Amino acid sequence: MKIEIPANKKLVFELTMPIRWGDMDAMGHVNNTSYFRYLEIIRIEWARSIGCQPDPTGDGIVIVNAFCNFYRQLEYPGDVLIKMYVSDVGRSSFETWATMERADAPGAIYADGGATTVWVNFPAQKSVPLPDRLRAIFE
C-alpha cells in the first residue's frame, strides 16, 4: 500500500545516491534499516542546502516519529533517487515525506516514508517556533 502524500505537499529536495554494497543484507537486497538511513540523509542534506543544519548550541530539526513502507527490493549496484516533500506546517513542526525509486527506473516507487519534524532549541530541549526563513520555503 502506497502512502498518500497530502495534496498540500511541496517538493523541496531531490537527491540521488549510490546503493552501497554494505547496504545489503544476507538476502541480497537493501536491508530495511538502510531505507531509514536514506530518509535521514535526505533530511540532513536538505536542511544543509537551505542553511538550517542542526546547531547543538542553538536551534535545529529533530524527528519525533518515522515510518517507511517497502514495495520492491532495492539491490546493489544502482542509484536511489529520493524526493522529499513537506506538508502540514504548524507553529514548530511540519511533516516530511519521501519517495524512493531507482534512478534507472524513474517513476517506479520502491519505498516511501516520512517523519514528523520539529524545530527545537537544543540547549532548552524544547520546541520553538519555526524560523521565518524556513517558513518562507514552505509557502
Image: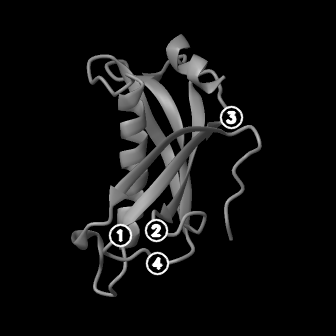
Q: Is residue 136 above or below residue 45?
A: above
Question: Is 76 displayed left or right of 43 in the figure?
Answer: left
Badge 2 density bin: few <14, some 14–19, many ≥20, Cα 10 Å: few
Identify which amino acid the numbered label 3 is placed on: Asp
Which residue is label 1 attached to?
78
Question: Is 118 displayed left or right of 57 in the figure?
Answer: right
Question: Which circle marks residue 88 in the picture?
Answer: 3
Which residue is label 2 attached to?
104
Q: Residue at x 52, y 69 (%)?
A: 105
Quadrant in which the C terminus appears = top right
Identify which amino acid the numbered label 2 is placed on: Asp
Question: Which circle marks residue 126 in the picture?
Answer: none
Which residue is label 4 attached to?
73
CB within 8 Å, label 1 to label 2: yes
Q: Secondary structure at mark 3?
A: loop
Badge 1 density bin: few <14, some 14–19, many ≥20, Cα 10 Å: some
N-term-proximal mark, 3 vs 4 = 4
Identify which amino acid the numbered label 4 is placed on: Gln
> What distance separates the C-alpha of mark 3 from that of mark 2?
31 Å
Badge 4 density bin: few <14, some 14–19, many ≥20, Cα 10 Å: few
